Amino acid sequence: MSALTKLMSASGGTWIGWTGAAGAAPKPFRHEGILNVPMALSATDVAGYYEGFANSTLWPLYHDCLRPPQYHRDWWRAYVEVNRRFAEKTAQEAPRGSLVWVQDYHLQLVPAMLRKLRGDVRIGFFFHIPFPPQELFAQLPWRRAVLEGLLGADLIGFQTVLGARNFGALARRFSAAHGRSSHLEIDGRVVRYGAFPISIDFKQFDDLARTDAIRERAAVVRARLGGRRILLGVDRLDYTKGIEPRLKAFRELLSSGAVDGRDCVMVQTAVPSRERVVAYKEQKSVIERNVGEINGAFATIGQVVVHYVHKSFAIDDLVALYVAADVMLVTPLRDGMNLVAKEYVASHPDERGSLVLSEFTGAAHELRGALIVNPYDVDSLFASLREALSFSQAEQRRRMRTMRQAVREHDVFRWADSFLEALAAE
């Protein structure tokens, strides 16, 4: 993250992480004042630890079991081993008395492992994804071990108050921890936990959106789409993102005549993600089939009604899409925060545009100017899309102004500062 990069550059921090590719790791290197220490994962590690336990056990479990989690003991052993290696490397690299900030569900065992190796450091942990309720987390055969791993931290951060409450209740139920809201005691230590909603670099997106180059790109996008009103979806290709019901609602808008394909177009981008995991391969096929069926039924020669793009975008191209879009569709079935919603808002200094936002995102608690929807309810999606397209300029400005103020005041720098200040406090 750019904000963490800037913070760490100022303090001379060290970043320990995996490159994302199997095989030997590059040698440590410095960039923008940060010492980057890459970790090596073998193909076997990637299959068991990353594709297996992290993304076929934990990811679905923590996202409402939208796909059945798979509980394989060899995946668990791989997860333990890789977490151990991260803890050992961190113990080697961390200066005495330093702050260590562990990021996300891939490394939940690291806090307790690191504490055994280095009792002098202060350890923080942050969840970028939702933390599940008791009835779901209880399925996990290694639930106590995971909770005890997290409880090695001094401070644990979640995207929402609900996620923090879920953790507190589970820790009291399945571990030796006890205590009240926001504080737990275990092994003679106090572990604090709470909500620290993540955000974006508002200024970066706002500044880009104001440039002539981006405005010109946005104008080109609109021209290429025939000057039609644009509904935009920007997601990783993931079964949690709610792309299917979104497409279904748009199809019903076309079928009912509520919108006309000559006046309105959907652009759906889907960044490739975890393509070796079976559930993701299946999701790709389903989305492509749905897009094909909609275009087959409603497109005319030279003018499709859904433009589907399966690739990553540079930030300039992404902001140009945000600027061009009349309605942003952010409708995950479950999401820890969802920063796309905030990026869209920050990219509209003209206060134009509307946001349709799932109630099952952390962002829904902050972006009060959005149309909040239940993404499982296609009728609600249908109505919200039609309403968003009908807003007057005055209504768009009123809603967008409210959301922009929220994102401007609670940007990623404030998020990082609030967590690190809380972690440093005794």
Image: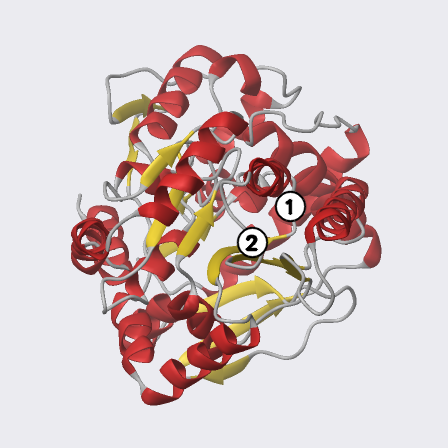
Q: Is residue 132 above or below residue 392?
A: above
Tell me what residue is drawn at x 61 percent, y 46 percent. Answer: 83
Q: How is the image coloured?
A: secondary structure
Q: Which residue is mark 1?
A: 238
Q: Residue at x 38, y 49 (%)?
A: 389
Q: What residue lies at 55% left-to-right and 31% top-to-bottom?
A: 62
Distance between the alpha carbons at the discs numbered 2 and 1 = 8 Å
Disc 2 target residue: 235
Which secondary structure, mark 1?
loop
Is 390 in front, or is 90?
390
x 81%, y 34%: residue: 74
Q: Using the image, tell me which numbered label, if any, was put on residue 364.
A: none
Q: Quadrant of residue 400?
A: bottom left
From the top left corner, tell me how far across and down residue 40 is, in percent: 70, 64
Q: Position of residue 318 (x, y in %)?
A: 48, 70
Task: Note whether residue 187 is visible.
Answer: yes
Q: Is residue 122 visible?
A: no
Which of 101/96 is in front? 101
Instruction: Give the class, few, some or many, for how many residues have Cα within 10 Å of label 1's Cα (few <14, many ≥20).
Output: many
**Dot 2, crowdedness within 10 Å: few (<14), some or many (≥20)?**
many
The amino acid sitting under disc 1 is: Asp
Which quadrant is home to the C terminus?
top left
Image x and y of residue 14, in percent: 43, 70
User: Is 375 situated left or right of 423 in this image?
Assistant: right
Callout 2, which amino acid? Asp
In this rendering, position of residue 47 left or right of residue 199? right
Confirm or deny contact between disc 2 and disc 1 (CB under 8 A).
yes
